[in-house]
Image (tube, rainbow, N blue to C red):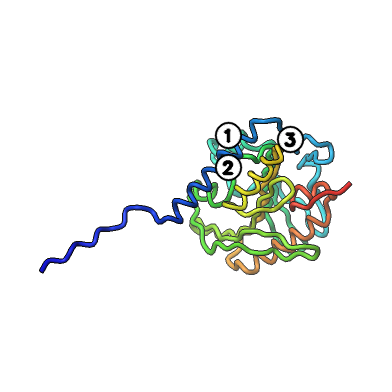
Amino acid sequence: MSLPLAMPRTQPAWWQLLLFCGCLCLALGASQLMQQDKQWLAQEPARRLQLEKAVPVEFAGWRLLDTRGLVEVPAETRASLDSLYNQQLSRTYINADGEKVMLSIAYGEDQSNDQSQAHRPEICYVAQGFQLHDEADVMLALPQRQIQARQLVARLHERNEPITYWMVIGDRVIAPGWQRKLAQFDYALQRQVPDGLLFRVSTLDRDASRAFEVQRRFVTALLSAVDPVTRAHLAGEVVHD
């Protein structure tokens, strides 16, 4: 007696189709809404941002060591980033204990699409040959608040670089993926073009736990040192007049 052969499943599960259709509808809906009368949040006087001036070169025991990033960005990647972001800041800071933190901020006036995600470590570091390890979404505990962030470790040969980063759209910190899509759609419903940025700190250290703690202290000191408008841009806080 012959048994019917089991055929492999070639069709996606129903929930995959549902997710795909939902994502497509959100993207199309946001695109249509953004074609109508738009209000650019970046043009509001209370939201004007100049990264070079707004981020201090010295604060709470940290001082500027270098104005260059320690990771060289290929020319073609740099050209792409320049087209996506209005402002980019890349600095290295050091404190009295010799601890060094690399700070990278990329700010764009239009965060209504996904092109700006090219600056995420998962994309730009991999493009430079790094391997990523121990990726995790975390709540970064600061004295005044918590920030939803992502932590990971990038490795290339002998270089071991723990990274903490988060993304801001408009006035909110969001995680890559669905949260980003929902935030974009929400602003589109309000006919607003949100600005936003990617905030990244990293440290060269074999001990990831120690590096993440250094980064947490650095972020705490930096956010305490900047003015409320800058803090709103960097950490998604709403500014009240």
Q: Quadrant of residue 108?
A: top right
Q: Secondary structure at mark 3?
A: strand
Nearer-N-terminus badge (3/1)? 3
The residue carrying pointer 1 sits among few (fewer than 14), some (14 to 19) or many (20 or more) residues within 10 Å by Cα, namely few
Q: Amino acid at mark 3?
A: Trp
**SS for dot 2:** loop
Q: Amino acid at mark 2?
A: Asp
Point out residue 93 in the picture as x, y percentages from the top left corner: 73, 54
Which residue is label 3 attached to? 40
Q: Please tell me whether residue 5 is drawn above or below residue 63 in the rendered image.
A: below
Residue drawn at (69%, 66%) of the image: 213
Of tags 3 and 1, which is closer to the observer? 3
What residue does disc 1 label?
79
Mark 2 neighbour class, 10 Å CA radius: few under 14, some 14 to 19, many 20 or more: some
Q: Residue 112 location in percent, x, y?
A: 64, 40
Mark 1 touching mark 2, by CB under 8 A?
Answer: no
Query: Residue 191 at what x, y percent from top left?
Result: 70, 37
In the rendered structure, the answer to whether residue 141 lies left or right of residue 75 reads right
Q: Which mark is residue 114?
A: 2
Q: Residue furthest right?
A: 241
Q: Looking at the image, is mark 2 or mark 3 earlier in the sequence?
A: 3
